[in-house]
Amino acid sequence: MKIIIGGALGHMGRELAALAAETGVTVACGVDVAWQGQASDIPMTREYDELNTEADVLVDFSRADGLPRLLEYAQKAHMPLVLCTTGYTDADQALISRAAQTLPILQSANMSLGIAVLRQLAAEAARALGSEYDVEIIEKHHRRKLDSPSGTALMLFEAVKQERGADTAAVFGRHGRDNRRTQTEIGLHAVRGGTVTGEHEVGFYGNGEELLLTHRAESRTLFAQGALRAAKYLAGKPAGRYAMQDVVAEVFK
């Protein structure tokens, strides 16, 4: 399999290139606006319109603001996309949905297979325990992370909300002396500090008991592993929107 890496000079782009080399996946080219001609283990270019190579899938670990240029290239090249970037707006999501009418696009706020399983378990727990249990989501990341709460925390919130009902509302942190919890809210709390790779906890708090579902990322390598698994899954798929849940479903067949 041949891949193109968007954001190839970033932390995750480098992780993905290294893992590809170890697992026999060819990196046809990397794309990064930070490339100034410096030496690289893979072919590089600054812009998508400078690409002149064939590949099976493009895996993007760049920035959300680069989405329009990325989609323009992918549609011209008929290139399947694995979108690993977070921070997309509602308008961005609409662009992705429009592009997915003609391209296979797999998007996830977190490429970990473990997180995909956590999302499934959280949904099942919400369905089984019902509205009598309060739900709180806590996420922790390193000090450099820009978006808050994390895209993964929001993804977990949506998974629980689908089971709890449309009137379920997110409450982002709590402050004040008159903040009594309501039965239809889910709290989302972000912690930023140090070098934490990533931790997500979905807690179900009932009358006399707690159920805590926790995922801790110990290395960025696991995100690269998930991205490669997603790329292999997506290659050859028809146009449409896909998620890591689809990859997990295939694993457990």
Image (cartoon, rainbow, N blue to C red):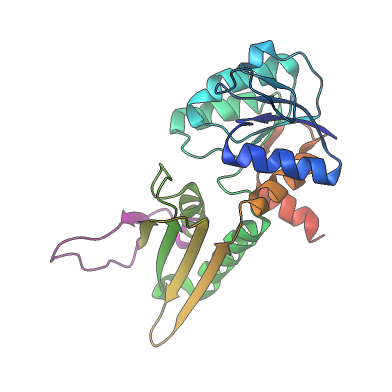
Q: Residue 240 at what x, y percent from top left? A: 69, 33
Q: Is residue 242 visible?
A: no
Q: Who's the residue at 53% across and 71% down the image?
A: 213
Picture layout, residue 192 above or below residue 208: above
Q: Is residue 141 left or right of residue 220?
A: left
Q: Residue 65 at what x, y percent from top left? A: 48, 26
Q: Who's the residue at 83% across and 38% down the image?
A: 25
Picture layout, residue 176 above or below residue 2: below
Look at the image and say whether residue 194 sits in the magenta stretch.
Answer: no
Look at the image and say whether residue 166 sits in the magenta stretch.
Answer: yes
Q: Is residue 103 visible?
A: yes
Which SS type dominates the magenta stretch?
loop
Q: Is residue 228 left or right of residue 177?
A: right
Give the quadrant of the N terminus.
top right
Q: Who's the residue at 59% across and 61% down the image?
A: 218
Q: Nearer the viewer, residue 134 or 23?
A: 23
Picture layout, residue 130 above or below residue 88: below
**Region of the chain picked out in magenta, as a range:** 161-185
Q: Residue 132 at what x, y percent from top left? A: 40, 75
Q: Residue 79 at what x, y percent from top left? A: 74, 24
Q: Nearer the viewer, residue 127 or 7?
A: 7
Q: Is residue 88 left or right of residue 176?
A: right
Residue 98: quarter of image: top right
Q: Nearer the viewer, residue 65 or 176?
A: 65
